[in-house]
Image (cartoon, grey):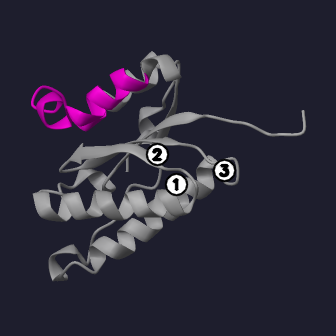
Amino acid sequence: MPQSLAKVLIHMVWSTKHRTPWLKDQEVRKDLYAYMATVLRNMDSPALIINGVDDHVHVLCLLSRKFTMAQLFEAVKADSSKWIKSQGEAYHDFYWQGGYGVFSVSESNRDEVIKYIADQERHHQKMTYQEEFRKLCERHGIEIDERYVWD
């Protein structure tokens, strides 16, 4: 086949360092998501939705054929961390956690994942980030070692 084609949807999840609630300010959060969307678009990995709560972020995007997942995470986390630190002295000590979770999403489940990400505020009235992450890993058949998954 002379043409290379791909459509890979990924659900990216990561938290602030130690799940510190850095993202309480709705305006900063909204601007952060817009900034992340630009980083992803510049890496040929357009976001379908970005949302989260005070201590973590969810992204559903298309994965570019040009970059690895690790390169994508490195760019979006590093660039957004630099950006948020520029938003005032209150954010100078901001850090993302070292790791992340990434889950494949089939086209047939795309709308369900979009709804799930859009409902983060309501969802986290009943569940912590850690409980949510454990369930996501379980649903996707990923075993986690509690000693190393949180920072």
Magenta extent:
110-131
Q: Does residue 25 appear anywhere in the picture?
A: no
CA separation in Å, label 1 and label 2:
8 Å
Quarter-of-image position of residue 120: top left
Considering only order in the chain, which callout, 2 or 1, is on the residue closer to the N terminus?
1
Residue type highlighted by circle 2: Tyr
CA separation in Å, label 1 and label 3:
9 Å
Decide whether residue 65 is among the magenta residues.
no
Asked if marks 1 and 2 touch (Cβ < 8 Å), the reply is yes
Q: Position of residue 83 (x, y in %)?
A: 34, 74
Considering only order in the chain, which callout, 2 or 3, is on the residue closer to the N terminus?
3
Quarter-of-image position of residue 138: top left
Which residue is at 29% across, 34% downward?
A: 117
**SS class, disc 2:** loop
Which residue is at 31% across, 60% downward?
A: 34
Q: Which residue is mark 2?
A: 100
Residue type highlighted by circle 3: Thr
Asked if marks 1 and 3 touch (Cβ < 8 Å), the reply is no
Q: Which residue is mark 3?
A: 68
Residue type highlighted by circle 1: Phe
Q: In the displayed structure, would residue 113 be above or below residue 53? A: above
Q: Which mark is residue 144?
A: none
Q: Position of residue 13 (x, y in %)?
A: 40, 42
Q: Which residue is mark 1?
A: 73
